[in-house]
Image (tube, grey):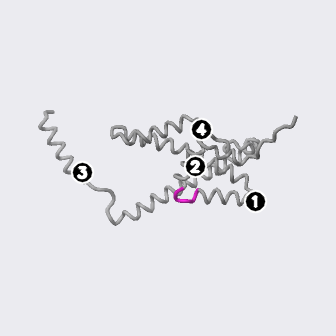
C-alpha cells in the first residue's frame, strides 16, 4: 500500500470517529456521583479488609496487637533530608515534575508517621477505648488531615514528640 492510500484511509478513519470532550453535559453529574460512589466503595473495602485482618490477628497472635508496633513507627533520618531536597528541586524548572513525584511518595510515609504519633497519644488517654477511637476518627475526618499528619510526621523526625509522653528516668542513688 502506498503512502497516498494510507493517508486517505487515515483521514477517513479520523472523520468517522467523533471527537468528544468526555460525557455529554447532561451525564456529567451522574458520572461525578458514580466516581464518588466508587471511591466510597473502595474505602469500605479497605476498611473491611483492615477489620478482618485485625480480627484474624487477634485470634491467631494477640500479642502482635498489644506491642504498639505501629505507635513506634519512625522512618530513617535520610527520608527527611530527601523530602527537603525534593522540595528544593521543585524550584528548578527541569526537575519540577520529579520533585513533585518524590514529595508525593515521601509525604505518604510522613502521613503514616504522623498517624503513629496520634495513635501513640490516643492510646495513652485516660479514657474508654471508644474515646480513643473517636479521637483518631476526628483527626482523620479533618479535611486537612493529610497535610497536618505529614507535617507532624516530618517534625517528629526532628523533635521526637513521643519521648515527651514518657515519664522521666529515675536516677539510681548510690
Q: Secondary structure at mark 1?
A: loop
Stretch of the chain drawn in magenta: 140-144
Residue that protrudes farthest toward the bottom in the picture: 26
Q: Mark 3 = which residue?
A: 17
Residue 45 vs residue 96, the one in the foreground: 96
Q: Secondary structure at mark 2?
A: helix
> Is 162 located above or below residue 138 in the figure?
above
Q: Mark 2 = which residue?
A: 152
Counting residues from the start of the chain, the first of labels 1 and 4 encountered is: 4
The label nearer to you, 2 versus 1, is: 2
Residue 36 vs residue 124, the one in the foreground: 124
Using the rendered view, name the quadrant where residue 110 is placed.
top right
Inter-mark Cα distance, 2 to 4 = 13 Å
Q: Mark 1 = which residue?
A: 128
Residue that protrudes farthest toward the right in the picture: 174
Residue 141 sits inside the magenta stretch: yes
Counting residues from the start of the chain, the first of labels 2 and 1 encountered is: 1
Which residue is located at x 57 percent, y 36 percent? Answer: 77
Residue 67 appears left or right of 14: right
> Is 89 located above or below residue 45 in the figure?
above
Inter-mark Cα distance, 1 to 3 = 63 Å
Count neighbours of disc 2 (C-alpha within 10 A) and say few if under 14, some if 14 to 19, many if 20 or more. Answer: many
Count neighbours of disc 3 (C-alpha within 10 A) and say few if under 14, some if 14 to 19, many if 20 or more. Answer: few
Using the rendered view, name the quadrant where residue 100 is placed.
top left
Q: Quadrant of the C terminus?
A: top right
Count neighbours of disc 1 (C-alpha within 10 A) and say few if under 14, some if 14 to 19, many if 20 or more. Answer: few
Residue 7 appears left or right of 98: left
Q: Mark 4 = which residue?
A: 75
Amino acid at each position: 500500500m502506498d503512502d497516498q492510500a494510507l493517508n486517505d484511509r487515515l483521514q477517513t478513519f479520523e472523520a468517522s470517529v467523533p471527537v468528544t470532550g468526555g460525557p455529554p453535559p447532561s451525564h456529567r453529574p451522574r458520572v461525578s456521583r458514580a466516581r464518588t460512589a466508587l471511591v466510597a466503595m473502595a474505602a469500605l473495602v479497605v476498611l473491611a479488609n483492615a477489620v478482618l485482618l485485625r480480627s484474624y490477628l487477634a485470634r491467631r497472635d494477640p500479642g502482635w496487637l498489644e506491642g504498639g508496633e505501629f505507635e513506634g513507627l519512625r522512618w530513617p533520618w535520610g527520608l527527611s533530608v530527601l523530602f527537603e531536597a525534593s522540595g528544593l528541586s521543585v524550584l528548578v524548572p527541569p526537575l519540577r515534575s520529579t520533585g513533585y513525584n518524590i514529595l508525593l511518595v515521601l509525604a505518604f510515609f510522613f502521613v503514616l508517621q504522623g498517624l503513629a504519633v496520634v495513635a501513640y497519644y490516643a492510646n495513652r488517654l485516660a479514657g474508654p477505648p471508644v474515646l480513643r477511637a473517636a479521637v483518631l476518627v476526628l483527626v482523620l475526618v479533618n479535611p486537612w488531615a493529610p497535610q497536618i499528619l505529614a507535617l507532624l510526621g516530618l517534625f517528629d523526625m526532628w523533635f521526637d514528640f513521643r519521648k515527651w509522653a514518657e515519664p522521666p528516668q529515675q536516677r539510681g542513688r548510690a
